[in-house]
Amino acid sequence: KLAGLALLINIGKEIGMSYYVVWMDSHEAKVFEFLPGEVKSEKVHMGAKDAKNLQDRDHHKMPTDYFHEIINKVKNATEVLVVGPGPI
């Protein structure tokens, strides 16, 4: 299955496609960009303001800065798979 994924990524890059996987929980996200022959990764940490809102269980204030930073990392993606341990 991994060989098939590598082939798909190589073909996708030839026609300008980009693939990302985002693993996220309520504290950090790991953003993986799949390129031909390599995988680049970056971490996004939740800021103090967003963390406090979650800690206070203030459901009216979503961690928007955290989400926006993740979105900026994948804004040029053709496809994004988001995974994690469960709801935030």
Image (cartoon, rainbow, N blue to C red):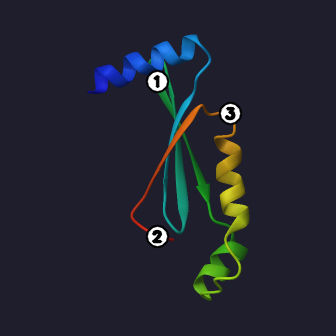
> Mark 1 is on which residue type?
Glu
Question: Which SS class for mark 2?
Answer: loop
Residue count near mark 3 (Cα–Cα under 10 Å), binned few <14, some 14–19, many ≥20: few
Q: Quadrant of the N terminus?
A: top left
Q: Nearer the viewer, mark 3 or mark 1?
A: 3
* Contact between labelled residues 1 and 2, with CB atoms less than 8 Å apart: no
- Of the pair 48 and 66, the residue shown nearer to us: 66
Q: Residue at x 49, y 64 (%)?
A: 25
Question: Which SS class for mark 3?
Answer: loop
- Of the pair 67 and 38, the residue shown nearer to us: 67
On residue 76, which mark appears?
3
Where does label 1 land, which residue? 38
> Mark 2 is on which residue type?
Pro
Q: Quadrant of residue 44?
A: bottom right
Calculate the distance from the C-alpha at mark 3 to the C-alpha at mark 1.
Answer: 18 Å
Where does label 2 land, which residue? 87
Q: Residue at x 62, y 34 (%)?
A: 77
Query: Which mark sits nearer the N-terminus, 2 or 1?
Result: 1
Q: Position of residue 30 (x, y in %)?
A: 52, 50
Q: Position of residue 82 (x, y in %)?
A: 49, 50
Q: Nearer the viewer, mark 2 or mark 1?
A: 2
Q: Quadrant of residue 31?
A: top right
